[in-house]
Image (tube, rainbow, N blue to C red):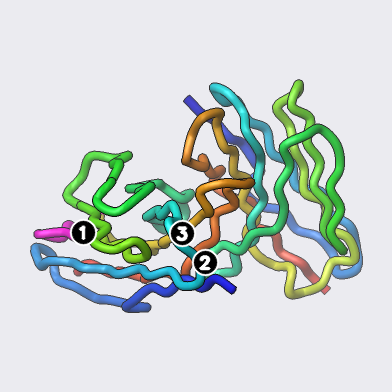
Amino acid sequence: SQTIHQWPATLVQPVGSPLSLECTVEGTSNPNLYWYRQAAGRGLQLLFYSVGIGQISSEVPQNLSASRPQDRQFILSSKKLLLSDSGFYLCAWTRTSGTDTQYFGPGTRLTVL
Amino acid sequence: GQNIDQPTEMTATEGAIVQINCTYQTSGFNGLFWYQQHAGEAPTFLSYNVLDGLEEKGRFSSFLSRSKGYSYLLLKELQMKDSASYLCAVKGAGSYQLTFGKGTKLSVIP
């Protein structure tokens, strides 16, 4: 069976500090991968998605970036965090064929102070 | 673009039936998804509709009318653990992405 992991689970960072969140998927190959942010009281906002190693599509211009160094690894980064970067960050995966149901990881709750 | 509307909050009684509606306007359509999200947790997949009609899965059913741009999620025999947010999401034609509504927060009361 497939599982998706994210770490860390929670993170408190000062404004201006760097960020690295990691997501890995097990039990499948060549998945599509997604990063979402969910701010308090708001819906899920798609940040990035990837259909293969080194292939990243950005949906929202901001101070975040994403990378996919390996088939089942997806990383979200920032060089300098802003207060507005606080939120619940979710990684998701889908198979490359079929219904494209997205399955979410447990999430990382980021607080920028 | 995509626009998805669902009620912000609903309250229902334990043991009752509740219907959560979702309307959408999209440029192309390739499926509608419902997710459940408990407070502080990640969304979990509930149902998928791509053709018109009703899909039943235990206590949960989901309906789709593509001509009306309308779906609902029906929860029967409500339990306290059903208190959660329910997210409607639409996949556009030829797209890798899902567009999510803001979610409906359901509170189940005794």
Res A69 → quadrant: bottom left
Type of amino acid at the residue the image marks with label 3: Ala
Label 2 resides on the chain identified as B
Q: Mark 2 highlights which residue?
A: B42
Judged left or right of residue B99, residue A38 is left
Label 3: state its secondary structure. Answer: strand
Find residue A83 and name its label.
1
Type of amino acid at the residue the image marks with label 2: Ala
Type of amino acid at the residue the image marks with label 1: Leu
Q: Nearer the viewer, residue A54 or A86?
A: A54
Find residue A92 and name its label.
3
Label 3 resides on the chain identified as A
Judged left or right of residue B62, residue B6 is left
The answer for how far apart the CA atoms under marks 2 and 1 are is 22 Å
* Residue A106 can be seen, yes or no: no
> Which portion, as a residue range, is magenta?
A77-84
Other-residue count near label 1 (Cα within 10 Å), few / some / many at <14 / 14–19 / ≥20:
few
Do dots 3 and 2 share one subunit? no
Other-residue count near label 3 (Cα within 10 Å), few / some / many at <14 / 14–19 / ≥20:
many
**Label 1 or label 3, whichever comes before in sequence order:** 1
- Asked if the residues shown at circle 3 and circle 2 are in contact, with their CB atoms under 8 angstroms apart, the answer is no
Q: Is residue A83 magenta?
A: yes
Residue A75: give x, y in percent of width and height: 27, 63
